[in-house]
Amino acid sequence: MFINCNNECFNYHGRWEKTNNGYKSHWVRPYVEFFCDADFGLKLGDGSGEYSVFVDGEKVNAEDGVYKLCKKSLVRLTANETAHTVTFKGVETEGSVGFVPSRKQNILFIGDSLTHSAVSHSVIIPRELDCDYTCIAQGSMALCVDRGYVKVKEELTPFKGMSAAFFYLTSPCEGRVPMVPFDFENERKYDKIIIQIGTNDHLTDESYVDGFVTVYREFVRKIIGIYGDTPVFLALPSADTVDGSGWRRNTIERCAKEAEAQYGNATYISSRGWDVEISSDNVHPTTQGYATYAYELLKHLR
């Protein structure tokens, strides 16, 4: 029996787009959940990218295209990457499929590779809090347009920065032209918003500071304008400029503190003193470093 993706038993989280071919994933780790009480197979659109399947929280693999179940289980299909979308068409099963209610808490993560990473706080925190989430992040992307390292089509250059890209359905790395504005009116309410951005903004000297400060302040203002009184946490990245000048973290800290002073629901979270282990590239944490950062951040969220 085939159960179409439009069936009400499927609960979608993150940014998905309903198309004639099925539900198409966008940005990082959007997921769909359902209960199932018998072996099942997934029907996906042609060209779908990498994805993961979890059964009762454990990552599993299919045997000849079939996922084996011995009892009624919670199933999650997660699309893994921004540039390689997954189109979910539905489920084949001889059993029944049921609706998984949304969890009590829902968190929005916004950021760059430090949020995008599969071992980052955007993965650890939802697991620890057993909450739903949406992750709008892109590796190599700066906050300011044209300051990062992300590569996109020339016609998408105006969206090459989170200050512009966040407000659209897809990451510019997906290569979609034209970009489609995101429908915020029908988005599920968030209980917390966590922003960690600025690592890719070339914050190395005074010439980059003024523009960043202006864009940061305006971005936070727009986020608060959309999400109202939802608490916004402005988290300081863990790595600083390699030359030891402190430009990167000092500038981001300044912006976050100014936003905290200006907006009653914005809170700056400092990562200074967290002893986050940084990898050999001097920017990204190690796996242990990501975990340290996530659990320190959790203390503030709790």
Image (cartoon, rainbow, N blue to C red):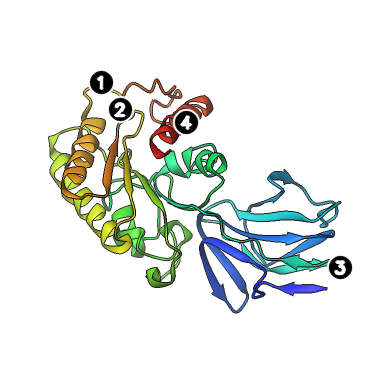
Q: Residues within 10 Å of mark 1 (few under 14, many from 20)?
A: few
Quadrant location of residue 115? top left
Image coordinates of residue 71 in percent, x first then y, are 83, 53
Q: Secondary structure at mark 1?
A: loop
Q: Secondary structure at mark 4?
A: helix
**Mark-to-mark CA distance, 1 and 4:** 26 Å
Compared with 171, 178 (above or below) is below
**Measuring 71% from the left and 55% from the top, which residue is drawn there?**
75
Image coordinates of residue 23 in percent, x first then y, are 59, 70
Q: Which mark is residue 240?
A: 2
Q: Which residue is mark 4?
A: 295
The mark nearer the N terminus, 1 or 4, is: 1
Q: Residue furthest bottom?
A: 20
**Mark-to-mark CA distance, 3 and 2:** 54 Å
Q: Nearer the viewer, residue 237 or 179?
A: 237
Q: Are marks 1 and 2 in contact (CB under 8 Å)?
A: yes
Q: Which residue is mark 3?
A: 94
Residue 298 appears in the picture as rendered: yes
Q: Amino acid at mark 3?
A: Glu
The mark nearer the N terminus, 4 or 3, is: 3
Q: Which residue is mark 1?
A: 244
Q: Nearer the viewer, residue 123 or 143?
A: 123
Q: Judge left or right: residue 149 versus residue 253.
A: right
**Measuring 27% from the left and 53% from the top, which residue is drawn there?**
145
**Measuring 80% from the left and 56% from the top, which residue is drawn there?**
72
Q: Secondary structure at mark 3?
A: loop
Q: Amino acid at mark 2?
A: Asp
